[in-house]
Image (cartoon, helix red, strand yellow):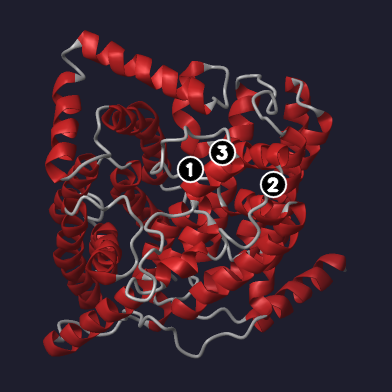
Amino acid sequence: MMPGLEPVALGGALRGANRYLLAVGFGAVAIAGQFLTGTDPVVALLLGIALTAGLAAVTAAGGSRTLLGVLNLALVAKFLLFAVVLKILVREPVDVNLEAPVETSLAMAIGFVSVFLASAAQKFLPQPKRWMIPRLDRPDLYLIAAVLCFLIGYPAWYAGFASGFDGENRVGGFLGIMRSAGLLRHVTVPALMLFLWARGSQRFLSHPAVILLSLVAVLVGVFSTAKQDILAPLVGILLVTYLRYGIWYRPTWVGAGVVVLLYSTVIYPYSQFVRFEGGRDGGLTDRAEAAYRVMSTLVTDEQFRQSLMEQNKVWAAQTGAFFNNPVLSNTERFTMVREADRLIAATKASQSFTEWRTLTWGLQMLAPRVLFPDKPAHGPGNFLAHEAGGILSDDDDTTQISFGFMANLYNAFGLMGVTLGSALLVLIFYKFLMLCVPNGLAFNLWGILFAMEFQHGFIEYPIGSLIAALVVIPVLIAVAFMVLILGRLLNLSSPLPANMLPARLDWAAVWSARRARLRVSGQ
């Protein structure tokens, strides 16, 4: 049986009690570790509860080989897991650089408990008879999908990049369509790997086509200067490898370590340095020149390198570091509790609650510009920073701060917004994803794309930007039907066995098996 499918999900449910106990145990250890570093006991307890609920939410969502499980794991890892563990390892109090530690910790605890409850509630909601995005059930369809995603994704990305507006979150018109279609390039390599997996190829990671397409994706990411674009091909390879071989397959955890190391030592510094040189501004030529200047001069010119390092120190001082240890300054994407704290603290100090304004921002972005000429082209992250005050300079109208939806909800309605809004948002958003694709990720190309896109978008975007990001779904539906039509015309292979395809989880069977196990263990 392939991992991540219904029989495995059933086994995962039988082991669920142990996984919940593991989450509780990890939370208890985290609380004890924070006590030892001198963290305020209230903060330590609240963050321990948040960690426990966040890790338990992974199991409640179906495990780490499911779409919802991956999103929950990314959420707790980026906001709290790395932040708390690294603070304990370097013996720094977790609350030492937080501006509103108790309020932020309380928001995190409430938010992650809400995520757990909303994830667990998915099993009680009606299941779709047919997914909105057609699934691919033959090996040749994954090869066709890889070709189409390459031929559509890269030109679409280039069109948006060359326009000079790729930093704007446009969702309508030509640029909006190109921006959404450009995301297809991220699953070119996963689609090819799924094809090789379905064919039973042993050359899974070392296949020449996988290596070549990965290099192309990394080079394009370097050229774009965006950390997310550089990481995307590496994350895709790691995810499909994990789906096929599991966590104990050596290349899986070695690859995970390499990705974290590359991000901390190469990708993050490079992206920051290019930003300082103007690589995020202007058109295609300006960005290319900035990227080339950094790549060609960084290694050879000591004075240039020192200048960029000084700029990075100034930037870190202005934005506020989470760690006192400067060696860990490159981990900001894995310690996002600091960003949430900045918005929560600023909102609490200024009492500038935005209510529905930023929550409906994405609906404004979805409206046609013909009907709404002055609709926003950027997400609300910049607006939130200015509205709260003290986070960005007055003349900075482009920087998008990744506060996350919990801080966004606090900024809108305070702790009551976090309590009700987090559960409602996750419940609706996850249900919508389950209407589009299966939860199991094995041989679920479009689910893998959602996992790769929303592990960044769902975790980091304010709610307005998250709503606007859903415009990619019509593009995926169109491409999926193109793949099916070409597959029917070419008819290169027979269907995959049923046990290799994502299946709906029979929750009644899961709970019956769980009750039977409890009765046996009680005898």
Q: What element carries label 2?
A: helix
Residue that label 1 marks:
401
Q: In this view, does 56 lie to the left or right of 214?
A: right
Q: Examine the image and state in which quarter residue 348 appears.
A: top right
Q: Is residue 4 left or right of residue 219?
A: right
Q: What element carries label 1?
A: loop
Q: Distance between the residues labelled 3 and 2?
A: 12 Å
Task: Quarter of the image for the C terminus: give it.
Answer: bottom right
Identify the amino acid type marked 2.
Answer: Met
* Residue at x 18%, y 89% (from the top left corner): 488
Q: Is residue 138 above or below residue 255?
A: below
Q: Is residue 175 above or below residue 216?
A: below
* Residue at x 68%, y 79% (from the top left corner): 124
Residue that label 3 marks:
339
CB atoms at circles 3 and 1 under 8 Å apart?
yes
Residue that label 2 marks:
108
Which residue is outermost to the top? Answer: 303
Identify the amino acid type marked 3.
Answer: Glu
Given this view, does label 3 or label 2 mark the residue nearer the observer? 3
x, y (%) of residue 425?
Answer: 62, 66
Which badge, 2 or 1, comes first in the chain's sequence?
2
